[in-house]
Image (cartoon, rainbow, N blue to C red):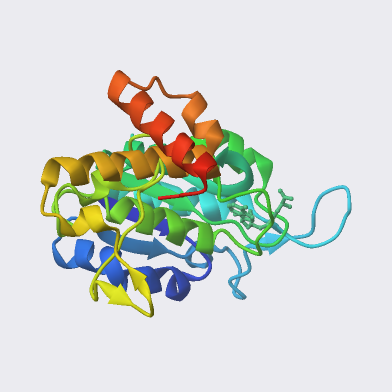
Amino acid sequence: MKIEVVTLFPELVEVVTRSGMPRVAVEQKALELSCINPRDFANNRWRKVDDRPCGGGPGMVMQAEPLAQAIETAKASLGPATRVLMMSPQGERMDQQWFQRLSQEAGLIVLCGRYEGVDERLVTSAVDVELSLGDFVLSGGELAAMVLIDGIARLLPGVLGHAESAGQDSFVNGLLDHPHYSKPVAWRGQAVPEVLMSGDHARQARWRLKQALGRTWLRRPDLLENLELDAEQQTLLREFVAEQKEGGGS
Ligand code: SAH
């Protein structure tokens, strides 16, 4: 996948591919990231791409023309049908389903706003989707774009070490992930749950599913409302709930 980020701070966005999964994705050539600076399309010698808001009010607004030219340049290299995503607190909330859907695309153009935002005429004429990181206001779209790139990079084919690893993650199957343990088996007086040391793979799989269901019930009951649990899942969740009520909790 090729991602072109339109940003006034390319050096900030490029950091996302220096470590972790995005770096692996780039090394494996599953991901190619480049940035386009709208200042390169400014029509003045100060490379200024913002101006005062029409009608007054505080701050500055990113002007439409340099952003339009930056997007056109990105489309010239990625193809005219490439989707343009704008980072915006007013957009649809990014979630795992968004990352999964977007990871199927061959290319994406990601637009990062700054200041008070972007001239609305550019948004209505050149942006396909506005995406938000959450109900708060950041000073720029770059951090949101980096979150998006990280979330997508780890889903690209061949990037995660274990093929199934992403399949167990929270939200992928509608549930939160189960808890994880590693060595040593006894740590500061706390043992790893006995079932995980039993070598009984079927029991372990049931334990993982039960914990995933239980955690979701405890922490994000809203997620369960969207799921149709099968008979085994219902039994496991009932067991988990009963154990909680007994005060066992495991
Ligand atoms: N005046 C705007 C906020 C501008 S913040 C408003 O109230 O809606 C400047 C830029 O930061 C935005 O254009 C957007 O690109 C980015 N940004 C801020 N908060 C964000 C969020 N929660 N998610 C994604 N991008 C965000």
Depth check, front residue: 138 or 111: 138
- The location of residue 94, given as percent across then percent down, is 50, 44
Position of residue 223 in the picture relative to residue 101 (left or right): right
Q: Residue furthest right?
A: 56
- Asked if one can make out residue 202 in the rendered structure from this viewpoint, the answer is yes
Image spot of residue 207 (x, y percent): 28, 44
- Name the side, left or right, on which 149 lies relative to 112: left
Query: In the figure, 175 relative to 63: above or below?
Result: above
- Residue ID at (38%, 80%): 188
Rendered view: 45 above or below 126: below
Q: As drawn, is 170 to the left or to the right of 120? A: left
**Residue at position x 29%, y 74% in the image:** 186
Q: Position of residue 150 (x, y in %)?
A: 36, 59
In which of the image's four quarters is ligand 1 placed? bottom right
- Residue at the location (18% across, 55% down)? 30
Q: How many marks?
A: 0
In the current view of this chain or complex, which residue is farthest to the bottom? Answer: 188
Give the camera-side residue of 197 and 59: 197
Residue in view at x 31 percent, y 69 percent:
17
Whole-percent x, y for residue 224 in the image: 48, 29
Q: Nearer the viewer, residue 200 or 92?
A: 200
Q: Is residue 80 visible?
A: no
**27 horizontally vs 61: left or right:** left
Q: Give the quadrant of residue 92.
A: top right
The answer to whether 197 is drawn above or below residue 208 in the figure is below
Q: Quadrant of residue 57?
A: bottom right
